[in-house]
Amino acid sequence: MTQAPIQLEMNGIVKRFPGVVALGGVSLHVRGGEVLSLMGENGAGKSTLMKILGGAYPPDEGVLKIDGQPVVFGGVSDAKKHGIALIHQELMLAANLDISGNIFLGNERRSLGGLGPLSRSSMCRTAQELLGRVGLKLSAKTPVSALTAGQMQMVEIAKSLAFNARAIIMDEPTSSLTAGESEHLFKIIAQLKSEGIAIIYISHRMEEVLQLSDRITIMRDGKYIGDLSRADATHDKIVAMMVGRALTTRFPDRPPLQASTDEPPVLSVENLMVPGAPCGVSFSARRGEILGFAGLVGAGRTELMQVLFGVDSANAGTMKLNGKAYRPRSPRSAINNGIFLAPEDRKRHGLVLPMSIAQNTSLPDIQNYTPKGWLNRKREHEVAQQELNRMRIKAPTVDVKTVNLSGGNQQKVVLGKWLAMKPTILILDEPTRGIDVGAKAEIYKTMDELAKAGITILMVSSEMEEVLGMSDRMVVMHERKIRGILSRSDFSQERVGLLMTGHDKPAVPAVATVVGARALREDGIDAHHRPISTESEQDELGK
C-alpha cells in the first residue's frame, strides 16, 4: 500500500533553557492519516518538542516543515493557522462558557464581514456540527462546567477541528477518562485517521500505545533514540529504548505479609458513612501492609481517602488508629496523627508549584523549622537534600522550582515531604498517574521499602496491573460500597473486574460483599475462606 506523504517534519531541533539543553537535535516526522506515538521518560523532552511544534516555544536551532516547505511560527495562533492543534493533558477550557463559546474562543465569527457583533447563531450551528463529528450528543449551548472529563476531551477535539486541524497532538488524553470514555476516544481517533488527519499521541499507558500506534518515536534525555513500527514494537523493546536498559521486573518481589495475631490493626474502620455513600464501609490495615483500593471512576475511593485525611467529615461510623479513637477534624489533625495523603492531582493539591523543592518539603511541617520564629534555612535544605537523595529526584539543587520538574519528579517531591515527617500511614491516590515506566519502577521500589520499614500504605489506583502487582490485600469498591476484600492469593483480573462492576458472584468462590453496612460473605465464609461462626468474627471481617 502506498504511504501518504510526510505532512509534518522536524529536523535537528535544539532548545536550550538556562543551564539546561532540553532538546539536543531531535528529528521527527508524521504522515497524513498516521497515528504516531511519542514516548519517553518524564524529562525526556516530549512536551518541549510538542510545544515547539504547537508554536508555544521557538526552536534555538533546527527546521520545521509542513508539506516539505520550511515554516517559522510566530506563536500558538500561527501554528493553528497552519493546521496544528495541541490538546494539553490539563484541558484548556473556560468553565464559565458554553461549548460553542469554547470551540470558537479566539476564533470568533462576526457578522458584517467580520466588523459586526458576534454571530452566535452561526457559531452555535457550526459547533453542533462539530460535536456530531466527535460523537458528542449534547447541545452546543451546554455549559462546560457541567461536562465530564471525557466530554471535555471531545470538546477539545471539536475545537481543533474548528481550526481545520491537519495534525492533532494529544498529551496523555486518557489520564482522567473512564474505560468507556477511553474507548470512545479511540473510535474518534480512528475516524480522524480515516479523514487524513495526523495524530501525535503521547501516553505512558503501554497498552494504549501498542493498540493505537502505526509507528512509535522514542526519546531519551532530550535526544531522538529511534522509531519502531507497530509490527516490531513490544513492551520490553519500548522500555529498553526509553530507559536505556531492560527493566527486569516491573514490581518488587513482595513475600506474603505475615501479620502477628497479637498485633492489632494500625487502622480500623467500622461502618464509616462517607458523604454521598448509600451505606457504611468497614476495613482495616496492618502495620507494613500495602492495602490497595480498586474501583472504577466514581467508586468513592478518593472520597473515602479524603475522610481518612480529614478533608471531609464522615456522617457516621468509627475509626481507630493504633487502637485509639480517631476522628480528624482537618488535614492538620490527620498530619498530627501521622496520616499523610499524596493526592490524585499533585499539581493542584500536592505542591505549591512556584515554590522550590526545599520550600515544599518544609511547608507542611513549618513549625519545626521555625523554633525561634525564624525559618532555619540550613535545616530546611539539609532535610530536602536528604529526601532528594532518597527519592532519587532529578534536580541539580533543592532550590529548583517544582514547576520546572517532570511529573515523575514532582510526585517524588510529594512523597519526600511526607517521608521527612515519618508517617504512620501514607495514603497514595493514583501514585503513578502520568509518569513513565522508569519513574514508576522507582516509586514501586520506594513503596516496598517503606512497607518493609513498617509504614502502612493505602494505595488507590485505577491501573489493574499496578493494584494487582503492589497490594498485599485489596479492597474493591463499586458505587461507594465495598464489594470485596481480597487477599493476594485470591487476586485475579477477572475477579477484581467483576467486583468493580458490581457483580458479587464471580464464577470462582464468592468473596466479601456488602450486606447493609457490613462486608459479609453471603455463604458465611470470610475473605480468607474461613467460616464466619460468631458475630464477633463477622465484625472482624476485612481486618
Image (cartoon, grey):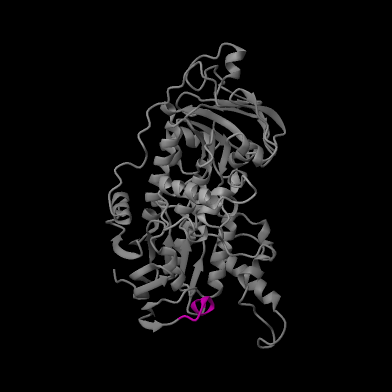
Residue 53 position, x and y percent, is: 44, 73
Q: Main secondary structure of the magenta part?
A: helix
- Would residue 256 be found to the left or right of residue 120 on screen? left
Q: Is residue 312 above or below residue 89?
A: above
Above or below residue 482? Residue 189 is below
Magenta stretch containing residue 79, yes or no? yes
Can you see residue 482? yes
In this view of the protein, which residue sits in the foreground, 417 or 138?
A: 417
Residue visible at 51% across and 16% down in the picture: 262
* Residue at x 54% of width, y 63% of height: 134
Q: Position of residue 363 (x, y in %)?
A: 59, 49
Q: Is residue 132 magenta?
A: no
Q: Quadrant of the C terminus?
A: top right
Q: How many labels were placed on the picture?
A: 0
Q: Judge whether 33 appears above or below 239 on screen.
A: below
Q: Quadrant of residue 44?
A: bottom left
Q: Nearer the viewer, residue 377 or 313?
A: 377
Decide which of 407, 38 is in the foreground and name it. 407
| Magenta residues, start to end | 73-80
Horizontal relation, residue 199 to residue 119: left or right = left
Question: In this rendering, is residue 233 above or below 15?
Answer: above
Is residue 346 visible in the rendered image? The answer is no
Residue 248 image position (x, y, % from top left): 29, 43
x then y, percent, for residue 502: 56, 35
Residue at 51 percent across and 19 percent down: it is 263
The quarter in which the N terminus is drawn is bottom left
Check the image and name the residue furthest to the front. 372
